[in-house]
Amino acid sequence: MSFEPRSLPVDAAARAALAAQGLEYRLIDPGDTAAVDAWVDADQRGFHHARPRPEAREFERRVLGERRAHGVYDSTIPEPAVPVATVSSWPAGLSVPGGRSVDGWAVSSVTVAPTHRRRGIARAMMEAELATASKAGAAVAMLTVTEATIYGRYGYAPAAKAATIQVDRRRARWSGPDAPGRVHFVEPAGLADLAPALWRRAVARTPGEIDRWPAIRDRVLGLAEPDSDSSRSLRAIRYDDERGKPQGFATFRVTREPHQPGWVEFDVLAAATDDAERALWRALIEQDFVSGTRGLLRSVDEPLEWLLEDPRAVTVSDVTDHLWIRIVDAIAALGARRYGAAGELVLDIEDPLGHAAGRFTLLVSADGRAVVHAADGAAESAPRRERSRSRSTSAEQVGSRARTAEPRSLKLDVRDLGSIYLGGVRPSVLARAGRITASNAGALDLADRMFAATRAPHLSIWF
Ligand SMILES: CC(C)(COP(=O)(O)OP(=O)(O)OC[C@H]1O[C@@H](n2cnc3c(N)ncnc32)[C@H](O)[C@@H]1OP(=O)(O)O)[C@@H](O)C(=O)NCCC(=O)NCCS
């Protein structure tokens, strides 16, 4: 989705709802440094973070320059230039099963000052983000959450998990294949040119990962605040294949008390190939003078335990819902991913906010491609009608192969569609939980096979 995030106007409904409370809802001009700095301060305060150091200000300004940031202002408070609520958003691709990407709308920095809580400010901002995402042509909105009880009411649902993976150094004896290439230590800054392209390839391999935005590179490589302790303790490794071509990188720190073995801690392992993934894991766990290695925000189906002589060297903890998504355009979202089985399934989607509501036919051909029709055209907006028309042509091509005699259908809420969309949970599990209703057992079985993904969805960053 090529789109200038600030090209759409402020949402009129949110502006009116907040104005009725004497509050002003407005877009931040990235050229207005004072407004940007005050917005960043409010965002930091909302998450109980320290104020940015002077050298980090420039970085934060750059981040906001890539986004659409809104603030809510109260002219009656002693410091009216500091917003009482913040939200930011930007278009970003979300990787979906089959090595594809869907147009997503990333939402971040949702804060409301404690002095202004529980007055509907978050609701006004969240509904506005969905309306804007829809206008921008996004199929899915997405966010990472501090608490799991906030966003379900807007149609978001957990879609990709993450976990902490700990490896005990004494038991970590490698039994996997030797990589054909080599791992090298490199200065983090030396990865600046390579990182975006390697990330793009790593993200494309993993459903649930989102496109990295330009400024994240500098944060991850310690370039945003190069003199901070945290940047100076950062180490980087790069995997080059047998032809010397870089195929992945990881960054880590060793945290330790004086004269004690430490822990290797990392949250960046970007691998464009399986060889790179294995080699980087190996380099991270085979370090001496450490008690072990701790990987944060790792996948729940890392191959690691299958690469060690003693699988009990690996402990998985803190498994958490990490990526939450909200289907905004059912036709575009369902049409974007590839499916695990051919067939025809009718989806009856309930959506109290309307965006994805309707009855849709999902027709999957033997190669996993889908064609999606709205059963009642009323659910489609004009651009959606155009998109589905173009897909209908290919529907006719695959329809005769995939069509089954008896229509199989699922009735589900938009949140449940979000949870099954990337393959993170089987539809039958949500049926057992009483959330999805199937027309018959065959429908559930088909849905399980269709929505299955070969790789568990995973998101390895906060945003
Ligand atoms: C979470 C937060 C943004 C909510 O803001 P708010 O303006 O008070 O929320 P609203 O008044 O619009 O409430 C909307 C709904 O969310 C509910 N809600 C608000 N905060 C909640 C929380 N922390 N847990 C569960 N429900 C919450 C409200 O009860 C209300 O429910 P209803 O629609 O059923 O009546 C605010 O508490 C906050 O800034 N928290 C700290 C930062 C944070 O955690 N941000 C989330 C980032 S992922």
Image (cartoon, helix red, strand yellow):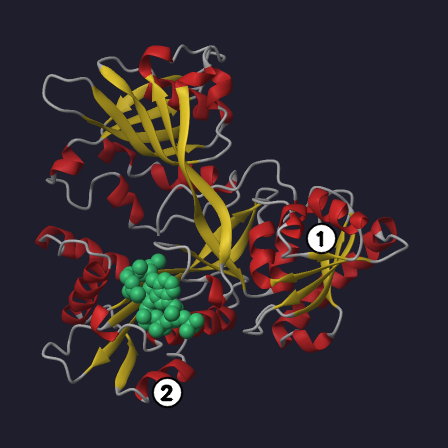
Spot occupied by residue 314 in the image (x, y as percentages of width and height): 41, 22
Q: With respect to residue 18, does 211 lie above or below?
A: above
Question: Which residue in the protein does label 2 denote?
Answer: 16
Task: Report whether residue 244 is seen.
Answer: no
Work out whether 331 lies above or below 447.
Answer: below
Which residue is rendered at x = 39% and y = 73% of the image?
Answer: 123
Residue found at x 40% / y 79%: 11
Is residue 238 among the parts visible in the rendering?
A: yes
**Crowdedness of circle 1 by 10 Å Cα count: few (<14), some, many (20+)?**
many
Q: Identify the residue at image location x=40%, y=10%.
A: 173
Residue 101, placed above or below residue 302: below
Gap in angstroms between the C-alphas marked 2 and 1: 40 Å
Instruction: Determine the secondary structure under disc 2.
Output: helix
Work out whether residue 339 or residue 151 is closer to the camera in this orientation and state it.
151
Q: Which residue is mark 1?
A: 370
Q: Position of residue 166 (x, y in %)?
A: 36, 26
Residue type, mark 2 in image: Ala
Q: Is residue 93 left or right of residue 333?
A: left
| Amino acid type at image mark 1 | Ala
